[in-house]
Amino acid sequence: MSDLIKDLDILPKKEEKDISCEARISQDNAKDGQRKLYIESYGCQMNFSDSEIVASVMEENNFGTTSNVEEADLIFLNTCSIRDKAEQTVRKRLQHYNNVKKNKPGLLIGVLGCMAERLKTKLLEEEKIVDIVAGPDAYRDLPKLVAEVDEGGKGVNVFLSREETYADISPVRLNSNGITAFISIMRGCDNMCSFCVVPFTRGRERSRDPKSVVAEAQELFDQGYREVTLLGQNVDSYKWSDDENNKARLEKKEKAEDMEITNFANLLEMVAKVSPELRVRFSTSHPKDITDEVLHTMAKYENICNYIHLPVQSGNSRVLDIMNRTYDREWYLNRVEAIRRILGEECGISSDMITGFCTETEEEHQDTLSLMDIVKYDLSYMFYYSERPGTLAEKKFEDDIPLDVKKRRLAEIIEKQGVHSLERYKMCVGNTYKVLIEGYSKRSKEHLQGRTSSNKVVVFPKKDFKLGEYAEVKIHDCTAATLIGESI
Protein backbone atom coordinates (compact mmCIF):
# COMPACT_ATOMS: atom_id res chain seq x y z
CA MET A 1 0.00 0.00 0.00
CA SER A 2 1.43 3.38 -1.01
CA ASP A 3 2.29 6.08 1.53
CA LEU A 4 0.12 8.49 -0.48
CA ILE A 5 -2.99 6.38 0.19
CA LYS A 6 -2.24 6.48 3.92
CA ASP A 7 -1.43 10.19 3.90
CA LEU A 8 -4.63 11.14 2.09
CA ASP A 9 -6.79 8.91 4.31
CA ILE A 10 -8.65 7.37 1.37
CA LEU A 11 -8.82 3.82 2.59
CA PRO A 12 -12.17 2.18 1.76
CA LYS A 13 -14.58 2.07 4.67
CA LYS A 14 -15.40 -1.24 6.35
CA GLU A 15 -19.14 -0.58 6.42
CA GLU A 16 -21.51 0.79 3.80
CA LYS A 17 -23.09 4.15 4.69
CA ASP A 18 -26.84 4.61 4.51
CA ILE A 19 -26.92 7.50 2.06
CA SER A 20 -30.61 8.13 2.73
CA CYS A 21 -29.59 9.38 6.20
CA GLU A 22 -26.85 11.75 5.08
CA ALA A 23 -27.79 15.45 4.98
CA ARG A 24 -26.86 18.20 2.56
CA ILE A 25 -27.07 21.71 3.92
CA SER A 26 -27.97 24.87 2.01
CA GLN A 27 -25.22 27.37 1.27
CA ASP A 28 -25.07 31.04 2.30
CA ASN A 29 -26.61 33.33 -0.31
CA ALA A 30 -28.98 35.51 1.75
CA LYS A 31 -28.89 39.23 1.00
CA ASP A 32 -29.52 42.10 3.37
CA GLY A 33 -33.20 42.46 4.17
CA GLN A 34 -34.09 38.88 3.28
CA ARG A 35 -35.50 36.35 5.72
CA LYS A 36 -33.12 33.42 6.11
CA LEU A 37 -33.97 29.91 4.96
CA TYR A 38 -32.05 26.84 6.13
CA ILE A 39 -32.63 23.68 4.05
CA GLU A 40 -31.50 20.24 5.19
CA SER A 41 -31.91 17.61 2.43
CA TYR A 42 -31.91 13.82 2.76
CA GLY A 43 -32.14 10.89 0.38
CA CYS A 44 -31.68 10.68 -3.35
CA GLN A 45 -30.26 13.08 -5.92
CA MET A 46 -33.82 13.99 -6.87
CA ASN A 47 -34.37 15.38 -3.35
CA PHE A 48 -31.22 17.49 -3.59
CA SER A 49 -32.42 18.78 -6.97
CA ASP A 50 -35.84 19.54 -5.48
CA SER A 51 -34.25 21.59 -2.69
CA GLU A 52 -32.68 23.79 -5.36
CA ILE A 53 -36.16 24.37 -6.83
CA VAL A 54 -37.48 25.21 -3.35
CA ALA A 55 -34.68 27.73 -2.83
CA SER A 56 -35.54 29.38 -6.15
CA VAL A 57 -39.25 29.63 -5.31
CA MET A 58 -38.46 31.12 -1.89
CA GLU A 59 -35.85 33.52 -3.31
CA GLU A 60 -38.61 35.07 -5.40
CA ASN A 61 -40.40 35.72 -2.11
CA ASN A 62 -37.59 37.46 -0.21
CA PHE A 63 -35.90 34.43 1.36
CA GLY A 64 -32.18 33.74 1.00
CA THR A 65 -30.49 30.53 2.12
CA THR A 66 -28.11 30.09 5.03
CA SER A 67 -25.86 27.27 6.20
CA ASN A 68 -26.23 28.32 9.85
CA VAL A 69 -29.39 26.99 11.45
CA GLU A 70 -28.98 29.44 14.35
CA GLU A 71 -29.56 32.32 11.91
CA ALA A 72 -32.61 30.81 10.27
CA ASP A 73 -36.11 32.29 10.26
CA LEU A 74 -37.41 29.23 8.42
CA ILE A 75 -36.14 25.62 8.46
CA PHE A 76 -37.10 23.12 5.77
CA LEU A 77 -36.28 19.42 6.09
CA ASN A 78 -36.53 17.82 2.64
CA THR A 79 -37.14 14.20 3.54
CA CYS A 80 -36.77 10.63 2.32
CA SER A 81 -39.12 7.72 3.05
CA ILE A 82 -37.30 4.93 1.27
CA ARG A 83 -36.25 3.33 4.58
CA ASP A 84 -37.53 3.55 8.13
CA LYS A 85 -34.05 4.62 9.27
CA ALA A 86 -34.28 7.69 7.03
CA GLU A 87 -37.57 8.73 8.60
CA GLN A 88 -36.23 8.17 12.12
CA THR A 89 -33.28 10.41 11.28
CA VAL A 90 -35.69 13.21 10.37
CA ARG A 91 -37.72 12.69 13.56
CA LYS A 92 -34.54 13.05 15.62
CA ARG A 93 -33.67 16.24 13.75
CA LEU A 94 -37.15 17.61 14.51
CA GLN A 95 -36.61 16.91 18.20
CA HIS A 96 -33.34 18.85 18.00
CA TYR A 97 -35.04 21.80 16.29
CA ASN A 98 -37.69 21.79 18.98
CA ASN A 99 -34.95 22.93 21.39
CA VAL A 100 -33.81 25.55 18.89
CA LYS A 101 -37.38 26.85 18.57
CA LYS A 102 -37.76 27.24 22.34
CA ASN A 103 -35.08 29.90 22.20
CA LYS A 104 -36.49 31.45 19.03
CA PRO A 105 -40.32 31.33 19.14
CA GLY A 106 -40.73 33.02 15.74
CA LEU A 107 -38.84 30.25 13.96
CA LEU A 108 -40.92 28.32 11.38
CA ILE A 109 -40.29 24.64 10.61
CA GLY A 110 -41.48 22.72 7.57
CA VAL A 111 -41.23 19.12 6.40
CA LEU A 112 -41.04 18.66 2.64
CA GLY A 113 -40.80 15.76 0.23
CA CYS A 114 -41.57 12.06 0.46
CA MET A 115 -42.05 11.80 4.23
CA ALA A 116 -44.40 14.79 4.12
CA GLU A 117 -46.39 13.14 1.34
CA ARG A 118 -46.55 9.78 3.10
CA LEU A 119 -47.57 11.04 6.55
CA LYS A 120 -49.42 14.21 5.52
CA THR A 121 -51.27 15.88 8.44
CA LYS A 122 -50.03 13.21 10.87
CA LEU A 123 -46.81 15.22 11.00
CA LEU A 124 -48.72 18.18 12.42
CA GLU A 125 -50.25 15.95 15.06
CA GLU A 126 -47.19 13.85 15.95
CA GLU A 127 -44.48 16.48 15.63
CA LYS A 128 -46.04 19.47 17.38
CA ILE A 129 -43.30 21.84 16.22
CA VAL A 130 -44.03 21.33 12.52
CA ASP A 131 -45.72 24.36 10.96
CA ILE A 132 -45.63 23.43 7.27
CA VAL A 133 -46.11 20.11 5.43
CA ALA A 134 -45.57 20.10 1.65
CA GLY A 135 -45.31 17.21 -0.78
CA PRO A 136 -42.97 17.07 -3.81
CA ASP A 137 -45.52 18.67 -6.16
CA ALA A 138 -46.46 21.57 -3.85
CA TYR A 139 -43.28 23.64 -3.86
CA ARG A 140 -44.77 26.53 -5.86
CA ASP A 141 -47.27 26.89 -3.00
CA LEU A 142 -44.64 27.27 -0.26
CA PRO A 143 -44.74 31.10 -0.05
CA LYS A 144 -48.51 30.91 0.47
CA LEU A 145 -48.08 28.22 3.14
CA VAL A 146 -45.50 30.36 4.94
CA ALA A 147 -47.90 33.32 4.84
CA GLU A 148 -50.65 31.16 6.36
CA VAL A 149 -48.34 30.23 9.24
CA ASP A 150 -47.29 33.88 9.67
CA GLU A 151 -50.96 34.64 10.18
CA GLY A 152 -51.29 32.02 12.90
CA GLY A 153 -52.40 28.95 10.95
CA LYS A 154 -50.76 25.79 9.65
CA GLY A 155 -49.60 25.31 6.07
CA VAL A 156 -50.39 22.01 4.35
CA ASN A 157 -50.33 20.96 0.68
CA VAL A 158 -49.76 17.33 -0.21
CA PHE A 159 -51.62 17.34 -3.54
CA LEU A 160 -49.93 15.14 -6.16
CA SER A 161 -49.99 16.59 -9.67
CA ARG A 162 -50.08 14.80 -13.02
CA GLU A 163 -48.50 17.77 -14.81
CA GLU A 164 -46.00 19.50 -12.49
CA THR A 165 -42.35 19.29 -13.63
CA TYR A 166 -41.05 22.73 -12.48
CA ALA A 167 -39.62 23.09 -15.99
CA ASP A 168 -39.84 26.90 -15.92
CA ILE A 169 -38.03 27.33 -12.60
CA SER A 170 -34.31 28.04 -12.66
CA PRO A 171 -32.89 26.24 -9.60
CA VAL A 172 -30.68 27.95 -7.04
CA ARG A 173 -27.61 25.69 -6.95
CA LEU A 174 -27.52 25.05 -3.20
CA ASN A 175 -24.72 22.50 -3.12
CA SER A 176 -22.89 23.70 -6.16
CA ASN A 177 -19.17 23.48 -6.73
CA GLY A 178 -19.75 25.47 -9.91
CA ILE A 179 -18.70 22.46 -11.98
CA THR A 180 -21.38 19.77 -11.69
CA ALA A 181 -25.16 20.16 -11.54
CA PHE A 182 -28.39 18.17 -11.61
CA ILE A 183 -31.13 18.57 -14.21
CA SER A 184 -34.45 16.91 -13.46
CA ILE A 185 -35.94 15.57 -16.71
CA MET A 186 -39.03 13.87 -15.28
CA ARG A 187 -40.93 13.31 -12.05
CA GLY A 188 -42.87 10.49 -10.45
CA CYS A 189 -42.80 6.76 -11.10
CA ASP A 190 -45.24 4.31 -12.71
CA ASN A 191 -43.36 1.20 -11.59
CA MET A 192 -45.02 -0.45 -8.64
CA CYS A 193 -42.09 -2.28 -7.05
CA SER A 194 -43.65 -3.98 -4.05
CA PHE A 195 -41.04 -2.69 -1.57
CA CYS A 196 -41.10 0.95 -2.67
CA VAL A 197 -43.04 4.02 -1.48
CA VAL A 198 -41.99 6.29 -4.35
CA PRO A 199 -45.12 5.86 -6.55
CA PHE A 200 -47.21 6.87 -3.53
CA THR A 201 -45.03 9.81 -2.48
CA ARG A 202 -44.05 11.23 -5.89
CA GLY A 203 -47.08 10.36 -7.99
CA ARG A 204 -47.47 9.38 -11.61
CA GLU A 205 -44.63 9.60 -14.10
CA ARG A 206 -44.45 12.68 -16.33
CA SER A 207 -41.68 13.95 -18.58
CA ARG A 208 -40.37 17.47 -19.06
CA ASP A 209 -40.25 19.35 -22.37
CA PRO A 210 -36.87 18.49 -23.95
CA LYS A 211 -36.38 22.09 -25.10
CA SER A 212 -36.37 23.26 -21.47
CA VAL A 213 -33.88 20.53 -20.52
CA VAL A 214 -31.48 21.50 -23.31
CA ALA A 215 -31.88 25.20 -22.46
CA GLU A 216 -31.00 24.52 -18.82
CA ALA A 217 -27.94 22.48 -19.87
CA GLN A 218 -26.83 25.30 -22.20
CA GLU A 219 -27.31 27.90 -19.45
CA LEU A 220 -25.23 25.82 -17.02
CA PHE A 221 -22.45 25.39 -19.58
CA ASP A 222 -22.43 29.12 -20.27
CA GLN A 223 -22.07 29.71 -16.50
CA GLY A 224 -18.97 27.50 -16.41
CA TYR A 225 -20.45 24.15 -15.38
CA ARG A 226 -18.80 21.20 -17.09
CA GLU A 227 -20.99 18.26 -16.07
CA VAL A 228 -24.74 17.70 -15.78
CA THR A 229 -26.61 14.68 -14.43
CA LEU A 230 -30.04 14.06 -15.95
CA LEU A 231 -32.34 12.86 -13.16
CA GLY A 232 -35.48 10.74 -13.06
CA GLN A 233 -36.83 7.79 -11.10
CA ASN A 234 -36.61 5.88 -14.39
CA VAL A 235 -34.91 7.96 -17.07
CA ASP A 236 -35.29 5.23 -19.70
CA SER A 237 -39.06 5.70 -19.75
CA TYR A 238 -38.71 9.41 -20.64
CA LYS A 239 -41.09 10.29 -23.50
CA TRP A 240 -42.27 13.62 -24.86
CA SER A 241 -44.41 14.73 -27.79
CA ASP A 242 -45.52 18.23 -28.80
CA ASP A 243 -48.53 16.67 -30.52
CA GLU A 244 -51.60 16.76 -28.24
CA ASN A 245 -52.97 13.52 -29.69
CA ASN A 246 -49.68 11.74 -29.07
CA LYS A 247 -49.56 13.19 -25.54
CA ALA A 248 -52.93 11.61 -24.83
CA ARG A 249 -51.75 8.28 -26.23
CA LEU A 250 -48.59 8.39 -24.15
CA GLU A 251 -50.70 9.12 -21.07
CA LYS A 252 -52.65 5.93 -21.82
CA LYS A 253 -49.38 3.99 -22.22
CA GLU A 254 -50.08 3.11 -25.85
CA LYS A 255 -47.26 1.71 -27.96
CA ALA A 256 -45.20 4.47 -29.47
CA GLU A 257 -43.84 2.99 -32.70
CA ASP A 258 -45.98 5.21 -34.96
CA MET A 259 -45.73 8.36 -32.84
CA GLU A 260 -43.48 11.38 -33.27
CA ILE A 261 -41.87 11.38 -29.86
CA THR A 262 -38.62 12.31 -28.14
CA ASN A 263 -37.36 9.32 -26.15
CA PHE A 264 -34.48 9.18 -23.68
CA ALA A 265 -31.88 8.30 -26.31
CA ASN A 266 -32.97 11.35 -28.33
CA LEU A 267 -32.82 13.62 -25.26
CA LEU A 268 -29.40 12.29 -24.29
CA GLU A 269 -28.08 13.14 -27.73
CA MET A 270 -29.61 16.62 -27.65
CA VAL A 271 -27.89 17.43 -24.33
CA ALA A 272 -24.59 15.92 -25.50
CA LYS A 273 -24.64 18.28 -28.48
CA VAL A 274 -24.69 21.37 -26.22
CA SER A 275 -20.89 21.13 -26.16
CA PRO A 276 -18.27 18.36 -26.37
CA GLU A 277 -16.78 19.96 -23.22
CA LEU A 278 -19.95 19.29 -21.22
CA ARG A 279 -20.02 15.86 -19.63
CA VAL A 280 -23.42 14.19 -19.41
CA ARG A 281 -24.43 11.61 -16.80
CA PHE A 282 -27.85 10.20 -15.93
CA SER A 283 -29.62 8.32 -13.17
CA THR A 284 -31.51 6.07 -12.65
CA SER A 285 -31.90 3.38 -15.35
CA HIS A 286 -34.46 0.61 -14.98
CA PRO A 287 -33.33 -2.81 -16.27
CA LYS A 288 -36.68 -3.44 -17.95
CA ASP A 289 -36.46 -0.25 -20.02
CA ILE A 290 -32.83 0.47 -20.88
CA THR A 291 -32.43 -0.01 -24.64
CA ASP A 292 -29.61 -0.69 -27.06
CA GLU A 293 -30.49 2.67 -28.65
CA VAL A 294 -29.46 4.41 -25.42
CA LEU A 295 -26.24 2.38 -25.26
CA HIS A 296 -25.36 3.18 -28.88
CA THR A 297 -26.01 6.89 -28.21
CA MET A 298 -23.61 6.70 -25.27
CA ALA A 299 -20.99 5.04 -27.47
CA LYS A 300 -21.44 7.72 -30.15
CA TYR A 301 -20.62 10.70 -27.91
CA GLU A 302 -17.38 10.83 -25.93
CA ASN A 303 -18.86 13.36 -23.51
CA ILE A 304 -21.70 11.01 -22.44
CA CYS A 305 -20.10 9.30 -19.48
CA ASN A 306 -19.34 5.61 -19.65
CA TYR A 307 -21.29 4.74 -16.52
CA ILE A 308 -24.75 3.29 -15.76
CA HIS A 309 -26.54 2.89 -12.45
CA LEU A 310 -28.61 -0.26 -13.06
CA PRO A 311 -30.27 -1.45 -9.82
CA VAL A 312 -30.81 -5.21 -9.71
CA GLN A 313 -32.26 -5.47 -6.13
CA SER A 314 -31.98 -9.31 -6.17
CA GLY A 315 -30.21 -11.95 -8.23
CA ASN A 316 -33.06 -14.46 -7.96
CA SER A 317 -35.95 -14.51 -10.44
CA ARG A 318 -38.62 -15.58 -7.93
CA VAL A 319 -37.66 -12.78 -5.54
CA LEU A 320 -37.61 -10.30 -8.43
CA ASP A 321 -41.12 -11.47 -9.33
CA ILE A 322 -42.57 -10.83 -5.86
CA MET A 323 -40.68 -7.52 -5.80
CA ASN A 324 -42.66 -6.75 -8.98
CA ARG A 325 -39.52 -5.69 -10.81
CA THR A 326 -40.98 -7.02 -14.13
CA TYR A 327 -37.73 -8.64 -15.28
CA ASP A 328 -35.89 -11.80 -14.29
CA ARG A 329 -32.26 -12.74 -13.73
CA GLU A 330 -31.79 -13.75 -17.36
CA TRP A 331 -33.14 -10.42 -18.67
CA TYR A 332 -30.91 -8.45 -16.32
CA LEU A 333 -27.79 -10.34 -17.35
CA ASN A 334 -28.76 -9.81 -21.00
CA ARG A 335 -28.75 -6.05 -20.38
CA VAL A 336 -25.35 -6.26 -18.68
CA GLU A 337 -24.01 -8.25 -21.65
CA ALA A 338 -25.30 -5.54 -24.00
CA ILE A 339 -23.56 -2.83 -21.93
CA ARG A 340 -20.25 -4.70 -22.01
CA ARG A 341 -20.59 -5.45 -25.75
CA ILE A 342 -21.54 -1.93 -26.86
CA LEU A 343 -19.67 0.20 -24.32
CA GLY A 344 -16.77 -2.05 -23.37
CA GLU A 345 -15.54 -3.79 -20.24
CA GLU A 346 -14.47 -0.53 -18.58
CA CYS A 347 -18.00 0.89 -18.53
CA GLY A 348 -18.84 1.51 -14.87
CA ILE A 349 -21.93 -0.31 -13.59
CA SER A 350 -23.37 0.25 -10.13
CA SER A 351 -26.40 -1.24 -8.44
CA ASP A 352 -28.88 -1.18 -5.57
CA MET A 353 -29.44 -4.40 -3.63
CA ILE A 354 -31.96 -5.42 -1.01
CA THR A 355 -31.24 -8.53 1.00
CA GLY A 356 -33.62 -10.35 3.30
CA PHE A 357 -36.75 -9.51 1.30
CA CYS A 358 -39.92 -11.36 2.33
CA THR A 359 -39.60 -15.18 2.00
CA GLU A 360 -36.04 -14.99 0.56
CA THR A 361 -34.33 -18.33 1.10
CA GLU A 362 -30.64 -18.96 1.67
CA GLU A 363 -30.35 -20.38 -1.86
CA GLU A 364 -31.96 -17.25 -3.30
CA HIS A 365 -29.53 -15.08 -1.34
CA GLN A 366 -26.71 -17.12 -2.92
CA ASP A 367 -28.17 -16.23 -6.34
CA THR A 368 -27.57 -12.55 -5.56
CA LEU A 369 -23.96 -13.32 -4.64
CA SER A 370 -23.45 -15.35 -7.81
CA LEU A 371 -24.94 -12.58 -9.96
CA MET A 372 -22.49 -10.17 -8.35
CA ASP A 373 -19.66 -12.50 -9.35
CA ILE A 374 -20.85 -12.37 -12.97
CA VAL A 375 -21.43 -8.60 -13.22
CA LYS A 376 -18.64 -7.34 -10.92
CA TYR A 377 -20.14 -3.97 -10.03
CA ASP A 378 -17.88 -0.98 -9.51
CA LEU A 379 -20.11 0.19 -6.66
CA SER A 380 -23.34 -0.87 -4.94
CA TYR A 381 -25.78 0.64 -2.48
CA MET A 382 -26.68 -2.29 -0.23
CA PHE A 383 -29.38 -2.59 2.40
CA TYR A 384 -31.38 -5.19 4.24
CA TYR A 385 -35.14 -5.07 3.66
CA SER A 386 -37.04 -2.46 5.64
CA GLU A 387 -40.83 -2.83 5.49
CA ARG A 388 -42.55 0.42 4.50
CA PRO A 389 -46.17 1.12 5.46
CA GLY A 390 -48.59 1.27 2.54
CA THR A 391 -46.41 -0.60 0.05
CA LEU A 392 -47.61 -3.67 -1.82
CA ALA A 393 -45.15 -5.88 0.08
CA GLU A 394 -46.46 -4.66 3.44
CA LYS A 395 -50.00 -5.56 2.36
CA LYS A 396 -49.24 -8.91 0.70
CA PHE A 397 -46.25 -10.48 2.47
CA GLU A 398 -44.99 -11.15 5.94
CA ASP A 399 -41.62 -9.61 6.79
CA ASP A 400 -40.44 -13.03 7.89
CA ILE A 401 -36.64 -12.93 7.68
CA PRO A 402 -35.08 -12.50 11.15
CA LEU A 403 -33.03 -9.34 11.60
CA ASP A 404 -29.84 -11.24 12.43
CA VAL A 405 -30.19 -13.21 9.17
CA LYS A 406 -30.76 -10.00 7.20
CA LYS A 407 -27.65 -8.43 8.73
CA ARG A 408 -25.52 -11.51 8.09
CA ARG A 409 -26.62 -11.67 4.44
CA LEU A 410 -25.99 -7.95 4.04
CA ALA A 411 -22.48 -8.36 5.48
CA GLU A 412 -21.77 -11.07 2.90
CA ILE A 413 -22.95 -8.82 0.07
CA ILE A 414 -20.88 -5.88 1.34
CA GLU A 415 -17.79 -8.07 1.66
CA LYS A 416 -18.17 -9.40 -1.88
CA GLN A 417 -18.74 -5.91 -3.26
CA GLY A 418 -15.52 -4.78 -1.60
CA VAL A 419 -13.63 -7.52 -3.45
CA HIS A 420 -15.22 -6.61 -6.77
CA SER A 421 -14.68 -2.86 -6.32
CA LEU A 422 -10.98 -3.41 -5.68
CA GLU A 423 -10.79 -5.70 -8.71
CA ARG A 424 -12.49 -3.11 -10.93
CA TYR A 425 -10.25 -0.30 -9.68
CA LYS A 426 -7.11 -2.39 -10.13
CA MET A 427 -8.06 -2.78 -13.80
CA CYS A 428 -7.37 0.95 -14.17
CA VAL A 429 -3.80 0.90 -12.81
CA GLY A 430 -1.36 1.71 -15.61
CA ASN A 431 -4.02 3.38 -17.76
CA THR A 432 -4.50 7.07 -18.50
CA TYR A 433 -7.90 8.75 -18.11
CA LYS A 434 -9.47 12.13 -18.82
CA VAL A 435 -10.50 13.47 -15.41
CA LEU A 436 -12.84 16.39 -14.74
CA ILE A 437 -11.38 18.25 -11.74
CA GLU A 438 -14.18 18.86 -9.21
CA GLY A 439 -12.30 19.95 -6.10
CA TYR A 440 -9.45 19.34 -3.70
CA SER A 441 -8.73 16.11 -1.91
CA LYS A 442 -10.49 16.05 1.46
CA ARG A 443 -7.15 15.69 3.24
CA SER A 444 -4.75 17.78 1.21
CA LYS A 445 -5.00 21.05 -0.72
CA GLU A 446 -1.92 19.88 -2.60
CA HIS A 447 -3.99 17.19 -4.33
CA LEU A 448 -6.96 17.54 -6.65
CA GLN A 449 -9.93 15.23 -6.93
CA GLY A 450 -12.09 14.39 -9.92
CA ARG A 451 -13.81 11.54 -11.67
CA THR A 452 -13.26 9.47 -14.75
CA SER A 453 -15.96 8.95 -17.35
CA SER A 454 -16.76 5.64 -15.61
CA ASN A 455 -17.40 7.53 -12.34
CA LYS A 456 -14.27 6.47 -10.48
CA VAL A 457 -12.76 9.00 -8.08
CA VAL A 458 -9.18 10.03 -8.91
CA VAL A 459 -6.72 11.90 -6.65
CA PHE A 460 -3.54 13.46 -8.07
CA PRO A 461 -1.08 16.33 -7.35
CA LYS A 462 -2.56 19.70 -8.28
CA LYS A 463 0.38 21.27 -10.17
CA ASP A 464 -1.02 24.19 -12.20
CA PHE A 465 -4.53 22.84 -12.82
CA LYS A 466 -7.69 24.73 -11.91
CA LEU A 467 -11.07 23.43 -10.79
CA GLY A 468 -13.36 22.71 -13.75
CA GLU A 469 -10.51 21.82 -16.09
CA TYR A 470 -9.84 18.43 -17.61
CA ALA A 471 -6.59 16.60 -16.88
CA GLU A 472 -5.06 13.49 -18.40
CA VAL A 473 -4.07 11.37 -15.41
CA LYS A 474 -2.04 8.16 -15.45
CA ILE A 475 -3.07 5.79 -12.65
CA HIS A 476 -0.33 4.13 -10.60
CA ASP A 477 -2.18 2.88 -7.48
CA CYS A 478 -5.67 2.42 -6.05
CA THR A 479 -7.91 1.40 -3.19
CA ALA A 480 -11.39 -0.13 -3.61
CA ALA A 481 -12.81 3.41 -3.80
CA THR A 482 -10.11 5.73 -5.19
CA LEU A 483 -7.60 5.83 -8.04
CA ILE A 484 -4.21 7.47 -7.39
CA GLY A 485 -2.37 9.05 -10.29
CA GLU A 486 -0.14 11.70 -11.83
CA SER A 487 -1.14 14.19 -14.53
CA ILE A 488 0.73 13.81 -17.81
Image (spheres, helix red, strand yellow):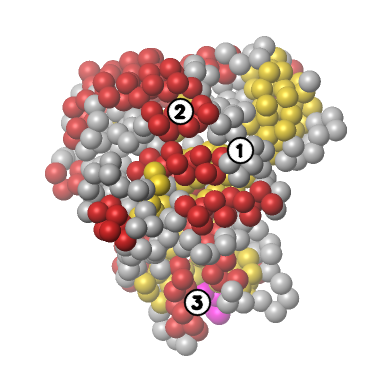
Q: Which residue is mark 2?
A: 296
Residue at disc 3, secondary structure: helix
Question: Magenta stretch?
Answer: 103-108
Tell me which residue sits at (61%, 20%) in the image: 479
Q: Is residue 21 above or below residue 36?
A: above
**Disc 2 from disc 3: Cα separation:** 45 Å
For this rendering, which residue is in front, 178 or 337?
Answer: 337
Residue 166 in picture, x, y percent from top left: 46, 62
Q: Identify which amino acid the numbered label 3 is placed on.
A: Pro
Q: Which mark is residue 279?
A: 1
Tell me which numbered mark, 1 or 3, is placed earlier along the sequence.
3
First in sequence: mark 1 or mark 2?
1
Q: Identify the secondary structure beneath mark 2.
A: helix
Find out whether residue 101 is within the magenta segment. no
Residue at numbered disc 3: 143
Residue at figure coordinates x 68%, y 18% from the top left: 432
**Residue 318 marker:** none
The amino acid sitting under disc 1 is: Arg
Relative side of 403 to 132, left or right: left
